[in-house]
Image (tube, rainbow, N blue to C red):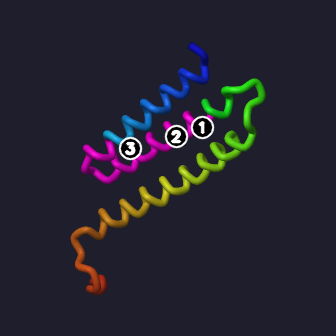
């Protein structure tokens, strides 16, 4: 079994685990983490496909690095948005905040 085939299989397993978590979990932070696991599986599959030949494809490696940066930024934004929703959960929309 070659290394690229192992990475390919592990990437598919990671993606399926993330999909399972996304469909089964209800807590928003856990769902965000499930989406991250799916993204990691996708990146692993892309790296495995890029290194199948003698000369690896630099475009796929560049896409994976760019995707990692975007994934970290999107995760930070999603977690901050989740925290903002959780803190304002009990206030009604459109009502002003009470002044002290």
* Relative horizontal placement of residue 3, taking residue 57 as reference (left or right): left
* Relative horizontal placement of residue 100, taking residue 63 as reference (left or right): left
Residue ID for mark 3: 34
* Relative horizontal placement of residue 31, taking residue 57 as reference (left or right): left
Residue ID for mark 2: 42
* First of labels 2, 3 by sequence position: 3
Q: Position of residue 1 (x, y in %)?
A: 56, 13
Q: Quadrant of residue 18?
A: top left
Q: Is residue 64 visible to us here?
A: yes
* Relative horizontal placement of residue 60, taking residue 95 as reference (left or right): right
Task: Assign the C terminus to one quadrant of the image.
Answer: bottom left
Residue ID for mark 1: 46
Q: Report the number of numbered marks.
A: 3
Q: Crowding at label 2, few (<14), some or many (≥20) Cα neighbours within 10 Å?
A: some
For label 1, the SS is helix
Q: Crowding at label 3, few (<14), some or many (≥20) Cα neighbours within 10 Å?
A: many
**In the rendered structure, are the residues bearing label 2 and label 1 in contact, judged by CB atoms less than 8 Å apart?**
yes
> Is residue 73 depicted above or below 63 in this figure?
below
* First of labels 3, 1 by sequence position: 3
Residue drawn at the location 44% of the way across and 40% of the way down: 37
């Amino acid at each position: 079994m070659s290394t690229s085939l192992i990475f390919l299989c592990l990437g598919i397993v990671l993606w399926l685990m993330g999909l399972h978590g996304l469909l089964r979990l209800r807590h928003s932070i856990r769902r965000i983490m499930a989406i991250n696991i799916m993204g990691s599986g996708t990146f692993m599959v892309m790296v495995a496909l890029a290194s199948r030949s003698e000369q690896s494809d630099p475009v796929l490696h560049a896409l994976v690095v760019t995707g990692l940066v975007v994934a970290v930024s999107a995760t930070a934004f999603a977690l901050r948005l989740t925290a903002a929703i959780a803190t304002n959960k009990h206030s009604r929309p459109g009502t002003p905040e009470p002044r002290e």
